[in-house]
Image (spheres, rainbow, N blue to C red):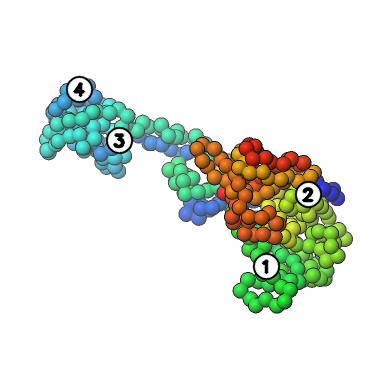
Amino acid sequence: MEKGVSLERAIELALQYPLPKHSETISLDAGRGRVLASALASKVDDPRFDNSAMDGFAVIASDCQSPGAELTIVGTSQTGGETPPSITSGQACRIMTGAPLPEGADAIVMVEDTEANQEQVTINGPARTGYIRKRAENLSIGQEALPAGTLLSSASIALAGTMGHGEVEAIKKPRIAILSTGDELVQPGKELAPGQIYESNSHALASLVESMGCEAVRHESANDSMDELRTTLDTLSTFDAILTSGGVSMGEWDLVRKIMEEEGDISFWRMKLRPGGPPLFGTWKGTPLFGLPGNPVSSLVVFHVLVAPWIAKALGYHSEMGPRLSQRVSVKLEEDVSGAPGKLCLRRIRIRSENGQLLATTHTHQGSGNMHSMVAHNGLTLLPPDTDGKAGDVIDAIWII
């Protein structure tokens, strides 16, 4: 067991026990929020044929040099219709948006720039070649447009359909169990007795797990009993991973740490991180287990910087197009922000854009029990160990999406 590891080392050690990665075929209708297990290449050219970007008339540009040119209408090109007639000099073809370009035409005149009857059209505006969408100008057959590890959003689902895919291979969602520990915890909505508090960490962690493309299964909090905790962990070992919250520090009743030391297999305990120093990682009956801090802010912060990257790397998510909770940015501090001796410091900040610059301020106190601070702010500093941030400094930060 390693103690007091850096964030980079913690991720490295956790990745020695990755989530299992399996795939399944799903319909495109079921794709929203899923992640591609394999890349998708286009089955067709996009567009499949030269077509019009406007309603109007397909013409030969050289016929339309003089205002008021009159052309004979030879037919209509409609979407999904028959092949339109070809045109020669002095002729035009009505055309709808997306309809095939008639052979011989090289420009489009918008309908607003014409006057027409059944037989003739008068050209009152420019004939534009730029209103023609060229075959395969977007995608060509066999071109890979959606890499493996892509999160299927509305746009990427539409693109998959455009490329001809009615089904896709998606990463099967790993099942992650979530357990909060502590005698003092009561589920929200129930009455509190003296000394009790509402349990919120498991709800927050479940939301984060789902956002990272996994299935979250919350379990009722475990009391401070080694026997009860052992039984619960044995039950949860059938999942792909376990997240616990609380019980990992140095106190007598920090039972997650104690039971993992005595009966589990710990890879590391404690990180050079503030907030969020006490986490542990190891395995219980072969199942990866993250022991996250009980303080609500610390629990969420550690998920953002440790658990989320572990999930993403283990499942092969695309670094830009896959599920992620945050984006690394550079921000200019508008006030002094203190760092932490010997630790990476993740102060909560509010990031905003002003005059082309990302600016950062703090709005509440930084206590690790202050969950309101995670709502009042939308980012975290990445102050290196032993480094304070001064007003005017440009520093690295995490912008929470």
Asked if residue 119 lies left or right of residue 93, the reply is left
Amino acid beneath label 3: Ser
Q: Secondary structure at mark 3?
A: strand
Residue at 29% x, 40% y is 97
State the mark number for residue 290. Answer: none
- Of the residues shown, which amino acid type is indicated by label 1? Glu
Residue occupying the far right of the picture: 262
Count of numbered badges drawn on the protein: 4
* In this view, the mark in front (1 or 4): 1
Q: Residues within 10 Å of mark 3 (few under 14, many from 20)?
A: many
- Which mark is in front, 2 or 3? 2
Q: Which residue is mark 3?
A: 52
Q: Secondary structure at mark 2?
A: strand
Query: Which one is in front, 49 or 107?
Result: 107
* Residue count near mark 2 (Cα–Cα under 10 Å), binned few <14, some 14–19, many ≥20: many
Cα distance, mark 3 to mark 1? 59 Å
- Mark 1: few/some/many CA within 10 Å (<14, 14-19, 20+): some
Can you identify the residue that label 4 sits on? 65
Q: Amino acid at mark 2?
A: Met
- Residue 245 visible? The answer is yes
| CA gap, disc 1 and disc 4 | 75 Å
Q: Residue beneath label 2, please?
A: 271
Asked if the residue at tag 1 contacts the one at tag 2, i.e. Cβ–Cβ closer than 8 Å, the answer is no
The CA distance from mark 2 to mark 3 is: 60 Å
Which residue does the numbered mark 1 point to in the structure image? 199
